[in-house]
Amino acid sequence: MPVRRHQAQSSESELDLTPMLDVVFIMLIFFIVTTSFVKESGISVNTPHAESAQRQESANIFVAINEAGDVWIDRRPIDVRALRATIARMHAENPQGTVVVQSDQKAATGILVQVLDQIRLAGIEKVAVAANQASASAGP
């Protein structure tokens, strides 16, 4: 009776990772595209309190005015005269968003009016002035 011998397969089985990597990269691209990044004005201001304050969900442009009257956008100071062009360019990138002006409560009203005027001259009607929600126990 003939004896059959099985030769051991010397080739090792390999696992192809290419399809898994493709899926991971596609998911990464999907999350990057669908993520909305939070934009900030770049400085922290002490905004006044208001009982009627509401959260703006679609805000994408933040303009900050500090106590000294300096205007900031995207973590850098900007001159009020250059504000209109900068706001118009940023609004063209996301036309559905609103502009939120974060003015320090000790900032001069005149600079706030100038900023609001430049925003309106840029063609933006959706403008909000930031305020903290006043609690029921907060005094004047």
Image: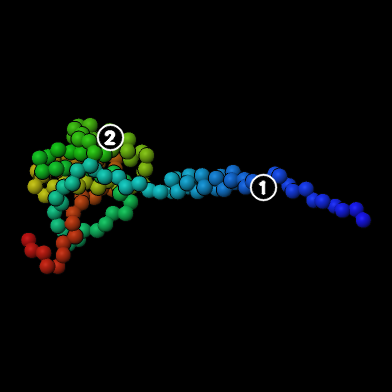
The amino acid type, in three-letter code, at marker 2 is Thr
Who's the residue at 19% across and 60% down the image? 133
> For the residue labelled by badge 1, is the local secondary structure a helix, a strand or a loop?
loop
Q: With 114 as the anchor, is 127 left or right in this view?
A: right
> For the residue labelled by badge 2, is the local secondary structure a helix, a strand or a loop?
helix
The Cα atoms of the two marked residues, 1 and 2, are separated by: 59 Å
Q: Nearer the viewer, mark 1 or mark 2?
A: 1
The residue lying toward the viewer, choosing from 68 and 119, is: 68
Residue 10 in sight? yes
Who's the residue at 16% across and 42% down the image? 65
Above or below residue 16? Residue 132 is: below
Which of the image's four quarters has the N terminus?
bottom right
The circle drawn on residue 13 is 1
Colour scheme in use: rainbow
Q: With 11 as the anchor, is 19 left or right in this view?
A: left
Residue 11 in percent (x, y) is at: 70, 44
The amino acid type, in three-letter code, at marker 1 is Ser
The quadrant in which residue 109 appears is top left
The residue lying toward the viewer, choosing from 101 and 22, is: 22
The circle drawn on residue 86 is 2
The quadrant in which residue 120 appears is top left
Residue 18 in percent (x, y) is at: 59, 43
